[in-house]
Image: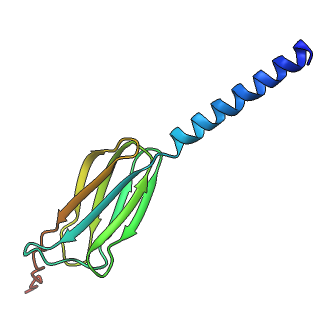
Amino acid sequence: MTFRNFLCAQLFILLVSISQAVSAQGGQTSTITGTVVDPNNGRIVGAQVTVESTHVRREVETNDEGNFVVELPPDDYRISVEKAGFKRFVLLSFRTQKASQHNVTFRLKVKDPVTPLKIN
């Protein structure tokens, strides 16, 4: 093996190692699992959960048990939860880290009923 071939082989091995390391780091996502409930701890089905940062936006809906799951890259997120008949809930800052798992519960407040205006 010539020195040039040896150097090319070493460079190839180095590039493959760097590529695998970057790929492994980039693949480590965070998981947020959660439940959306009403003031009496009743599960809310079909609530819209939006998780967003400056780079990522995910929208999911709670399932038949009021649960949701979102997988995201590590970042600082804003989480909002909405459902008709309830006040919108917003969590302005929620930080995730590599390969972390978070379990949260969001309790929505019932909207005040709208009183119709009487025009005389």
Q: How many marks?
A: 0
Residue in the foreground of this view, choosing between 15 and 73: 15
Q: Residue at x 13, y 79 (%)?
A: 114
Q: Position of residue 11 (x, y in %)?
A: 76, 22
Left or right: 53 in relation to 120 = right
* Residue 109: quarter of image: bottom left
Q: Residue at x 65, y 31 (%)?
A: 17
Q: Residue at x 59, y 41 (%)?
A: 23
Q: Residue at x 36, y 41 (%)?
A: 97
Residue in the foreground of this view, choosing between 24 and 51: 24
Left or right: 72 in relation to 12 = left
Q: Position of residue 85 (x, y in %)?
A: 19, 78
Residue in the foreground of this view, choosing between 114 and 74: 74
Q: Quadrant of the C terminus?
A: bottom left
Q: Position of residue 8 (x, y in %)?
A: 83, 22
The colour mode here is rainbow
Q: Is residue 108 above or below residue 84?
A: above
Residue that lies at the very extreme toward the top in this rendered image: 3
Residue that lies at the very extreme toward the right in this rendered image: 2
* Residue 40: quarter of image: bottom left
Residue that lies at the very extreme toward the front in this rendered image: 1
Q: Quadrant of the N terminus?
A: top right
Q: Position of residue 72 (x, y in %)?
A: 43, 52
Q: Is residue 19 above or below residue 120?
A: above
Q: Is residue 69 above or below residue 20?
A: below
